[in-house]
Amino acid sequence: MEAEMKELQILKGVGEVLSRRLVEAGYDTFAKIVAAGEDGLKKIQGVNPRLVGSIISQAVEFAGEMSEKTHKSKSEKIGELKQRVVNLRCQVQQVAFNVRDRFMDHVVGKNGKKVEHELVKMISALEMVEGKLDTRMKKAGKGLTEAEKRLGDLSTTGLKNVGKKLKKARKSLENVYA
């Protein structure tokens, strides 16, 4: 029961008490939470109705990851993670080009230098993550996912916010090798 509770606590919005209630209600796996749906989860005492949708979507994602994990070899997983690192590196390079094109006049200023510094650090962090893929696959996957989310769409943000998002993305990658 403790193992199932710990596993369910990965979901944002599910703490120790709620995970215990979910397990006691028979929802001890991500797949069972998905199968319960909104109606099933709302019946459990202590579930925030506003978080039900989020909990279910997270459970769908984790249930999919669990089924993928059982079917892929370690070398396949590492290959996929390496491809994600390459894609993220390309995305960072694209950010650099976009910043140069959009903020040509401001790149020489204080914020421009900060963004340039963050771009260099980001590339370095990606190289460090790539070196740790063999030993920290799970952490690398989570860090890459978080970095990809943070770098999602920077086309409409200002120069200062680009720097902030780059820094947050880099910090999520640093958790892999720290």
Image: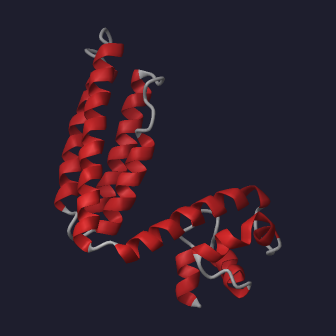
For the point 22% across and 69% down, which residue is it?
75
Residue 70 sits in which quadrant? Answer: bottom left
- Side of 46 relative to 69 (left or right): right
Q: Position of residue 118 (x, y in %)?
A: 28, 35
Q: Position of residue 8 (x, y in %)?
A: 58, 75
For the point 39% across and 29% down, which residue is it?
162
Residue 43 sits in which quadrant? Answer: bottom right
Residue 51 sits in which quadrant? Answer: bottom right
- Side of 138 relative to 5 (left or right): left
For the point 47% across and 25% down, which residue is it?
157
- Side of 8 relative to 36 (left or right): left
Look at the image and tell me in which quarter the C terminus lies.
bottom left
Q: Position of residue 42 (x, y in %)?
A: 80, 68
For the point 43% across and 24% down, which residue is it?
155
Q: Position of residue 27 (x, y in %)?
A: 67, 80
User: Is 177 rendered above or below residue 66?
Assistant: above
Look at the image and tell me in which quarter the N terminus lies.
bottom right
